[in-house]
Amino acid sequence: MSKTPQSPLIINNGIVYDPLNNVLGEKASLYIKNGKIVDEFRENGAKVIDAQGMLVMPGGVDIHTHIAGSKVNTGRMLRPEEHRVSFVPKGVMPRSGGGYSTPTTYICGYRYAIMGYTTAFEPATPPLKTRHTHEELNDTPIIDKACFPLLGNNWIIMNYLKDRETEKLKGYIAWIMQAIKGYAIKIVAPGSTEAWSWAKGISSLDEEVPHFGVSPKEIIRGLVEINENLNLPHTVHLHTLNLGRPGNYETAIETMRILEGFKPAKERKRVLHITHIQFNSYSGTSWKDFGSGAAEIANYLNSHEHISVDMGQVVFGNTTTMTADGEWQYRLRKLTGFKWVNGDVELETGMGVVPYIFSRKNFVNAIQWSVGLELALLTKDPWQVYLTTDHPNGGPFTAYPTIISWLMSKKARREMLEKVHKAASGRTTLPDVDRELDFGEIAVISRAATAKALGLKDKGHLGPGADADIAIYPIYPEKDDAATEPKKVIKAFSKTAYTIKDGVVVAEKGKIIEQPFGKTFWIDVEIPDSIIKETYNDVKESFDKYYTINLSNYLIGDRELLRSSPIKVSP
Amino acid sequence: MQEIMLVFKEKLKVPIEAEVISPNTFSGKKMNEIAGLKVWHGNRRIKLGDVFEIEGETSNEPENLHIIIKGDASKVKCVGKRMTSGRITISGNIGMHVGAEMYGGEIIVEGDAESWAGTELYGGLLNIKGNAGDYVGAVYRGEWRGMKKGLIMVEGNVGNELALWMRGGKITVKGNAGSFACAHLSGGTVMIHGDINGFLGAEMKKGIIVTFSKLEELLPGFKFNEEVPILRLDEEEIEGPFLRFVGDLAESGKGELYVLKEKNQHLT
């Protein structure tokens, strides 16, 4: 950890985009003391950064990126060939490492920092494997982080839902967040991964999960209810059924409809986050008539504000898909014939890892590429759709600058459309979309809205009291036109002029100069002991009967996290 | 053709990583620049001139360059890696990764080659007069896109996992082959004259394997198809008769395996 004493810092005359505080492209200076943004001060000893005319934003907040844990590591082990071609020697970065779609932990932290990202959340950790996830997060430098436990196929939860034991379920969710240091409820293919361990799948929201007698709909509704009841900072984070299949936009809309009229906790608008929605926005009945259903999804989002989504944008090239949706990975392996891994996590979830090459000449891939962009551009409210690639499923997070250039420039999109299979023009609405996002909207989809959705009060903005996580990009909003110069945009968003984390300059012009370790957030729900106690007895019984490990070995202590940062929540 | 001769100054104890020994790197450089090329020697970088006495005449075009290494080069790795044209002759043994990822040109090894010879070959000719180690014409760890084009000839024996994941081109082995030869083969032709240690063609999808010796065991994924009196490949005809098997049925089963009938009556 960095031992450097922090001197106050002043960032002068940048063009600041801070949408949460309604600052959009104003020339302003930022003042930083003790890792926080403060009101203006005068001090002789302060370090001064001259950001004259440069783009200044809060540090990026990635809401969904698979960077740590057992399936990520399985991906690394499955793909030694990409660690041969993509590697970083010590010296270029403070520690060596490698991997393109499956980078090692240190390289992952460095690459995020160089892009101006200072927070990234691992969205899928089986509770049983979360010790591994935290070990890797501990080894991921610079960025702040957290992980979402996978709870959509959990035996204890499904039993409680079937028996309508709402209080006990509340106790279990509160307990599990504390027990394994989790941040939000993640549901992957509700019930379907459990069905997959019986070599079956679930494709309808009303189908019953074998042996449990609950439907995916009940799982989603039940967990959303508990989530809002407990007042957790993030909404339920859902990977819907039928991911990747033609015609699945209908499933996505049906899923959103389940929660129409549902009352969110406190002042929040949303009750559900549907992740990597691109993979769930396809029309058609087979691969032959595969098309885009993005317009329908965007229409729904435009008239309903209870749902937020992230893009899950596809970028062309070689990547590694990894998900808890074991059944889908089996299907994908059948399509590609590549090497693969499929796994089961007792009582909790499953997983699969399959390499994938998104090819410009493949018409399905070309449509997938268009769909992600359509979603981001047709959805009117940028606070509803966030920038992700579902790293590494749609492509590595290092593709964000390129995606930003597509979002900001019709010219860049047109150039790409010419290079890809003509289905991208013929079967989607992308060629007709004229919208070009501005820097303010980019700041929304990549930091402000994601921080807000995650309930991170000190992130995603630059108001006094916020964490001093700042990205200064070498692009000049007053004279550079993003719409006509996409290459400039890519270059600027790939390497910040300065990345500041908690008031420390961590990266400068693409070089890592300091590597402090970030915090790991987790949720500490203040819930009456009596509720937890009752649940605990059931959990204990479940461990005695079914789990292969002892309950005491399951719990993760505060001290196992390098910088444990509990967020207290009272229901 | 201009010749450049590399003669060892003294015997190497620690291997060097010498992918710079390639007509592509040497061409267009003066002799002193060639001697100044850097190579990894353990964890240090030294100059090529520290290892070899370098003599001869250089050329601007790689295709006109013939590099000759004199002496036992079994501690010199990656010679001719990614070369596209020209010629390299090694008068003795050569270290690992000779001709790996080579695109064209010609490498002749008079002695033995260590493992990974001709790995992921994209073209050119690699001729090994002695024995070769494991992974001849194979792939590096994790890769599934193996040797694509070109020709590898080994006069002696080869180690395990010959032609692993090979997609095209041709490999001929005059001697014996170790275990898992042609595993995951998905194209190209492999001929093995000597004995084979087992698991031949495991999970092969496509491609042709021809063997001339007695095959002790055949994987259960192979099925007898027909008897072929004369085997006709692209440009050659081989007197048989051969027994034709198809496999590996654990995969697509489109691979072809020809074994000489007179030595393999036990397989019929």
Image: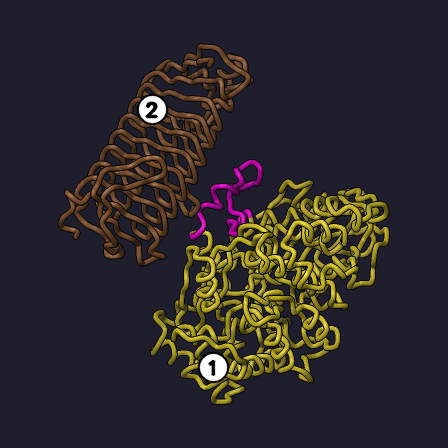
Which chain letter goes with mark 2? B
Q: Give how far apart the Cα atoms at labels 1 and 2 are.
A: 66 Å
The magenta-colored residue range is: A78-107
Where residue B152 sits, quadrant-wise, is top left
Magenta span includes A561: no
Chain letter belonging to callout 1: A
Classify mark 1: helix, strand or loop.
Answer: helix
For residue A158, the mark is 1
- Residue, far top: B56
Badge nearest the viewer, 1 or 2: 2
Among the chains pictured, the one given brown colouring is B
- Residue at the image position 85 percent from the left and 48 percent from the top: A478
Above or below A137: residue A226: below
Q: According to the image, label 2 marks what residue? A: B109
Q: Judging from the image, what is the letter of the chain drawn in yellow?
A: A
Which residue is rendered at x = 30% and y = 51% of the image?
B202
Q: Where does residue B35 sit, x and y in percent of width and height?
A: 48, 15
Task: Tell me the tag on residue B246.
Answer: none
Please rate how many residues cluster around mark 1, counting C-alpha atoms within 10 Å: few if below 14, some from 14 to 19, many from 20. many
Q: Are marks 1 and 2 in contact (CB under 8 Å)?
A: no
